[in-house]
Image: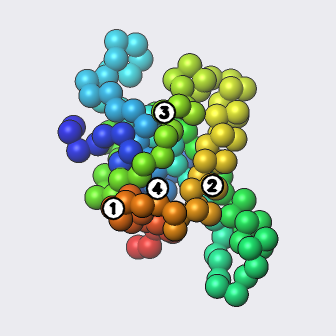
Amino acid sequence: MAIIKSGKVVIILAGRHAGKKAVVIKNVEDGNADDKRFSHCLVAGIARGPRKVTRGMSKKKVEKRSRTMKPFVKYINVRHVFPTRYQVDMDLKKVVDEADLVGDKKVEVKKKLKKIFEDRYLNQKQITSEKKAAGSSYFFQKLRF
């Protein structure tokens, strides 16, 4: 599928993280010869989003409420993913390596992802591209349906 590319914001449709937003890191079109013979993609998303922030809150309180974010990293079948029109320009390929998704290394990857997500959430106004800024703000909003 040419629609699902790295950096695309998607919504997970099935499984534990159904209804959550994620960013595609890597897309495998026809599957691999190992255990996944179907087209799938590696995604990193937010299992638990940041808490609500109001304008009257201090900077310290805003940082504290944004620390509640909890990321996830997962391989997902392409049919269980709903692509959106938004793109995000986060460098997640450097943080998430396929070899690191086994055992204790996955915990370290999640910690690094949490730091990247928190930094981007707190510095949303510094994004120069209007299209990327819209994707970033959409990614951190709660899905409303």
Q: Earlier in the sequence, mark 2 or mark 1?
A: 2
Q: Earlier in the sequence, mark 2 or mark 4?
A: 4
**Which circle, 3 or 1, is nearer the viewer?**
1
Horizontal arrangement in the rendering, residue 48 relative to residue 3 (left or right): right
> Disc 1 marks which amino acid?
Lys
Q: Position of residue 108 (x, y in %)?
A: 70, 33
Viewer-nearest residue: 125 or 36: 125
Q: Position of residue 121 (x, y in %)?
A: 58, 61
From this view, report whether residue 112 is shown above or below residue 141. Answer: above
User: Which residue in the structure is indicated by mark 3?
Assistant: 93
> Disc 4 marks which amino acid?
Lys
From this view, report whether residue 29 is shown above or below residue 15. Answer: above
From this view, report whether residue 94 is shown above or below residue 144. Answer: above
Distance (Cα) linking label 1 and label 4? 18 Å
Mark yes or no: residue 122 visible. Answer: yes
Q: Position of residue 101 (x, y in %)?
A: 59, 26
Viewer-nearest residue: 127 or 93: 127
Question: Which image quarter is the C terminus in?
Answer: bottom left
> Disc 3 marks which amino acid?
Lys
Q: How many marks?
A: 4
Furthest-left residue in this view: 2
Distance (Cα) linking label 2 and label 1? 19 Å
Label 1 neighbour load within 10 Å: few <14, some 14-19, many 20+: few
User: Which residue in the structure is indicated by mark 2?
Assistant: 119
Give the quarter of the image for residue 31: top left
Q: Which mark is residue 21?
A: 4
Identified at 68% across, 26% down, the residue is: 105
Distance (Cα) linking label 3 and label 2? 17 Å
Label 3 neighbour load within 10 Å: few <14, some 14-19, many 20+: few
Identified at 79% across, 71% down, the residue is: 60
